Amino acid sequence: MNKDIFLTNNLSNKKEKFVPIDKKKIGMYVCGPTVYDNPHIGNARPLVIFDILFKVLKCRYGKDSVTYVRNITDVDDKIIKSSQENNISISDLTKKIINNFIDDCDFLICEIPSEQPKATEHINLMIKMITELMDKGFAYKNSKHIYFQVNKFSDYGKLSNKKLKDLIAGSRVAVSDNKKNPEDFVLWKPSIHNEPFWDSPWGKGRPGWHIECSAMSKKFLGSEFDIHGGGIDLLFPHHENEIAQSRCANDTKAFANYWVHNAFITMSGEKMSKSQGNILSIKDFKGKINGQILRLALMSAHYKQPLDWNDKLLEECKNTIEKWYNVYLPLKVPSKIPDDMMLPLYDDLNTPGYIANLHKLFDRANEGVDNDKKIFISACNFIGILNQTKKEWLDFKKKKSLISEVDILKKIELRNKARKTQNYKEADKIRDELLDKEVLIEDKDGKTSWKIK
Ligand SMILES: [Zn+2]
């Protein structure tokens, strides 16, 4: 099999063969959450997509050869605003949301990245980088603010395919009296009132958002590394600014070599956003739906395509996993996944292609040969599916059931009595009541069995 990995690189807008800088030390940096509110299902997509990429890279280059860094933004205007609105201290708010975020990642069966640095623990490195940018003439100070001067970096706009003059004409940049040019962006700003602050050569203040990723990626992965990822909404200005800061501060021809972005999630065709009021937080699904279902749903479209989130999608994913559990057997050692099975994932992380292969493998496994079952389960496990035992899967369904087991059995008894006296109307009524509570009953060979839908 051709073991090359291909990725769509937004720097070239092409699908490219992935060639690591050092195949023993592969670096991937993904922009993580800003911890001001509970993560929503749109935030879940990059968590799962880059988790799969992490697995694929480890599969190809060895499990100790990949460093996956996902930062936590715990200082930001949105955090300050949310702490004021909710009357909670910034540290209590960020602690709470970080804990919720970690729970959500676990619920979505994502591996823990190699590093999860927090911005507030790296302010010194940001101050150092800003100082370097000033010394080299890429940044300037005005009214206690430090700005990056965009027109000093000739490659600005290469990632997002934007030209400076179009940016200004289209007012895609925040205007401020303090800036020399409207496209310049802030590296450091003064803290006012009771906003969090750090001492710096420019007075008490805090960093602009973009600089943290430049500083922390350098610490963990070096000045140049392999893959930088995130949601497509981060491509401009965040990632464009990261490139400008890092390349100017570090004096390099490159920053990250491959820029990989996942597309949005829509809700029944509409873009999901706070202003639309159609945000679904990940925690809303807990206890109601198994994390495996969400995970499969998040992988059901190619990462470059928008994914429409709706009940039908979740129902289909639930039915698929339910069916796949029919061939479940516990594995002591995973089986080798056939090379041709892996091909779609190597080819630009084609998760729907891999899922299609799983369906074919299932058909073989369903014929009853244990070895085929083992291969199928190993291939599911690789992407974080069927990772619970069948008992755990069934127990979860029982737990989320809207009626207790004792009450189900009582209802079935009543229904059987009704049937014996040929009161079929009553029997059907009880069956429908159970169905409303997601309990399916089946009569076979004179016996009635039940299962949770
Ligand atoms: Zn970032």
Image (tube, grey):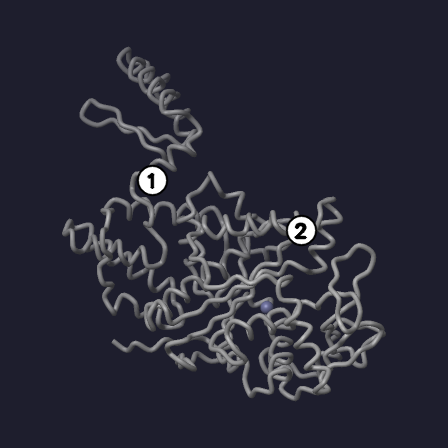
SS class, disc 1: helix
Q: Quadrant of residue 19?
A: bottom left
Q: Earlier in the sequence, mark 2 or mark 1?
A: 2
Judging by the rendered image, the residue that carries numbered circle 2 is: 91
- Say if 343 sits above or below 248 in the image: above
> Seen in the image, is 451 located left or right of residue 276?
left
Judging by the rendered image, the residue that carries numbered circle 1 is: 392
Image spot of residue 287 (x, y percent) = 47, 38
Q: Report, in whole angstroms, how far the alpha carbon at label 2 lies from the one at label 1.
A: 36 Å
- Say if 350 sits above or below 84 in the image: below
Q: Residue at x 55, y 73 (%)?
A: 219
Residue 346 visible within the image: yes
Q: Residue at x 35, y 67 (%)?
A: 63
SS class, disc 2: helix
- Say if 306 sits above or below 6 in the image: above
The C terminus: image quadrant:
top left
Front residue of this view, candidates 278 and 209: 209
Front residue of this view, candidates 285 and 26: 26
Q: Residue at x 71, y 45 (%)?
A: 88
Front residue of this view, candidates 169 and 37: 37
> Seen in the image, is 402 located left or right of residue 78?
left
**Residue type, mark 2 in image:** Ser
The N terminus: image quadrant:
bottom left
**Residue type, mark 1 in image:** Glu
